Image (spheres, helix red, strand yellow):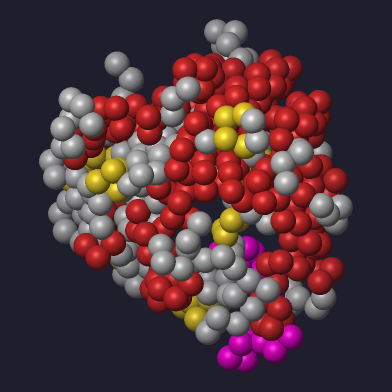
């Protein structure tokens, strides 16, 4: 079955700020209904050269999607006649602007479900990679191809974003073409619950960056950053990215987030099968004035929220966005960490207590320091490694209490354990890469590609 990009469904017109706040309230779920979803992005490169892969051609990203469709009952999604996505009832495969492949997984009751899904996805892309001579990399950034040589995927929205991001920061095109993350999504039961989770997720950003740092090599060279991906986000678009100060001092988080997003410049709206550029007007102005005869709807609001990129993002659930994409064996580590903290009230409070006394200025400095120094970066008298070690212990207790066990009796701490060992040793994935790059690899990008390529379990 094939189809064009979805047409918008009928959606109510926005009448007031209360309508926008209600959008978040409508996402509240009772605790027994809480799920966890994980989204995995990964660079796709030529297995021999390490160069990023264009869309066109017999070994291009379009061919990747077609080959994946042959291996599973995916539904094909087309835009302007080009295959741009796959989906089934539970998950989707989409393209980031530079050809990074994203798997948006199903909403799972446990991380064991997510792990089974990840394993199936890895098997599928490894098989496609072997067929086409491509490698799918467990890295936070495409390691060789610079922006001026990098491909652009044929999606309408990316053409609009590309033009705007050339004016909002020095590294916006790098963000689009090179970066890759692993993102975890969590539910909330009330505005109070959302406020506590949003506050912790935002505050955790430097710690998450330090633990997951996995992008030290970009444009074929050592960048001076352990997470160059995180550094890129700091110079992409200050109006829509970064830490949001109100996360730490507001009670009405839904209202505060709505007011912030109202003033974020829009990229586009979707009408009549096309993305219509907004000209940079704010969503607030769109609500009051309309755009090209179109009035703002809740569907437009939902679309706009996907173009806001803070370190933690509110929609009808909470998105934790700070980590670099990881090697397969570590992919579920930061989702496990955050599940242990966010889905146990005592652990949520205990983790917040560890980092609650940092000032806003300290948080902002720590965000950049974490990108550069990883676990060795400091806040006050302690390294981020020390903070991470304490928080991992709290998260492990949260997962123990949640007691989500698979058939062999193992609970979800098995996904946290590899991260705990790395933090205890004071290393992130970037530290391992840099040690090899400067020694036995002799700065050979092919060795990095071979090292970071997805593999199936032996």
Residue 452 seen from this side: yes
The image position of residue 404, as x and y in percent, is 66, 19
Which residue is found at the position 67% from the left and 82% from the top?
286
Rendered position, 445 above or below 16: above
Residue nearest the observer in this picture, 1 or 421: 421
Which residue is found at the position 40% from the left and 39% from the top?
226
Quick one: which residue is furthest to the bottom in this view? 293
Quick one: which residue is furthest to the left in this view? 48
Name the quadrant of the N terminus: bottom left
The image position of residue 417, as x and y in percent, is 53, 17
User: Which span is picked out in magenta?
Assistant: 288-307
Q: Is residue 36 left or right of residue 231?
A: right
Residue nearest the observer in this picture, 78 or 295: 295
Quick one: which residue is furthest to the front in this view? 381
On whether residue 296 falls in the magenta region, the answer is yes
The image position of residue 342, as x and y in percent, is 71, 34
The image position of residue 20, as x and y in percent, is 77, 67
Q: Is residue 442 left or right of residue 432?
A: left
Quarter holding residue 159 = bottom left
Residue nearest the observer in this picture, 365 or 195: 365
Q: Is residue 39 left or right of residue 205?
A: left
């Amino acid at each position: 079955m094939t189809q064009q990009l979805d047409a918008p469904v009928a959606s109510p017109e926005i009448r007031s700020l209360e309508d926008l706040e209600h959008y978040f309230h409508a996402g509240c779920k009772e605790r027994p209904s809480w799920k966890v979803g994980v989204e995995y992005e990964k660079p796709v490169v030529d297995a021999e050269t390490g160069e990023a892969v264009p869309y066109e051609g017999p070994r291009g990203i379009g061919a990747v999607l077609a080959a994946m469709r042959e291996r599973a009952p995916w539904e094909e999604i087309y835009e302007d006649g080009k295959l741009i996505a796959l989906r089934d009832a539970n998950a989707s495969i989409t393209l980031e602007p530079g050809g990074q492949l994203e798997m948006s997984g199903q909403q799972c009751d446990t991380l064991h479900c997510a792990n089974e899904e990840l394993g199936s996805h890895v098997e599928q892309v490894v098989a496609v990679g072997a067929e086409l001579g491509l490698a799918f990399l467990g890295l936070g950034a495409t390691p060789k191809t610079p922006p001026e040589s990098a491909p652009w995927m044929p999606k309408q929205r990316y053409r609009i974003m590309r033009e705007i991001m050339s004016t909002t920061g020095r590294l916006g095109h790098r963000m689009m073409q090179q970066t890759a993350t692993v993102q975890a999504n969590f539910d909330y039961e009330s505005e109070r619950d959302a406020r506590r989770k949003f506050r912790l997720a935002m505050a955790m950003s430097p710690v998450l960056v330090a633990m997951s740092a996995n992008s030290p090599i970009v444009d074929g060279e050592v960048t001076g950053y352990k997470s160059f991906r995180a550094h890129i986000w700091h110079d992409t678009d200050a109006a829509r990215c970064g830490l949001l100060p109100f996360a730490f001092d507001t009670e009405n988080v839904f209202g505060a987030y709505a007011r912030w997003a109202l003033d974020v410049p829009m990229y586009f709206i979707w009408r009549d099968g096309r993305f219509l550029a907004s000209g940079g007007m704010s969503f607030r102005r769109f609500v009051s004035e309309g755009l090209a005869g179109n009035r703002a709807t809740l569907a437009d609001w939902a679309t706009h929220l996907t173009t806001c990129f803070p370190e933690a993002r509110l929609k009808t659930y909470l998105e934790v966005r700070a980590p670099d994409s990881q090697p397969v064996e570590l992919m579920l580590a930061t989702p496990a960490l955050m599940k242990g903290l966010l889905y146990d009230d005592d652990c949520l409070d205990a983790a917040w207590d560890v980092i609650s006394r940092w000032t806003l200025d300290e948080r902002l400095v720590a965000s950049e320091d974490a990108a550069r120094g990883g676990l060795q970066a400091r806040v006050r008298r302690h390294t981020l490694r020390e903070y991470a070690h304490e928080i991992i212990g709290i998260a492990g207790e949260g997962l123990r209490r949640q007691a989500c066990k698979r058939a062999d009796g193992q609970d979800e701490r098995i996904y946290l354990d590899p991260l705990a060992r790395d933090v205890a040793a004071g290393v992130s994935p970037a530290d391992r890469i840099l040690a090899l790059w400067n020694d036995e690899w002799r700065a050979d990008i092919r060795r990095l590609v071979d090292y970071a390529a997805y593999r199936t379990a032996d």
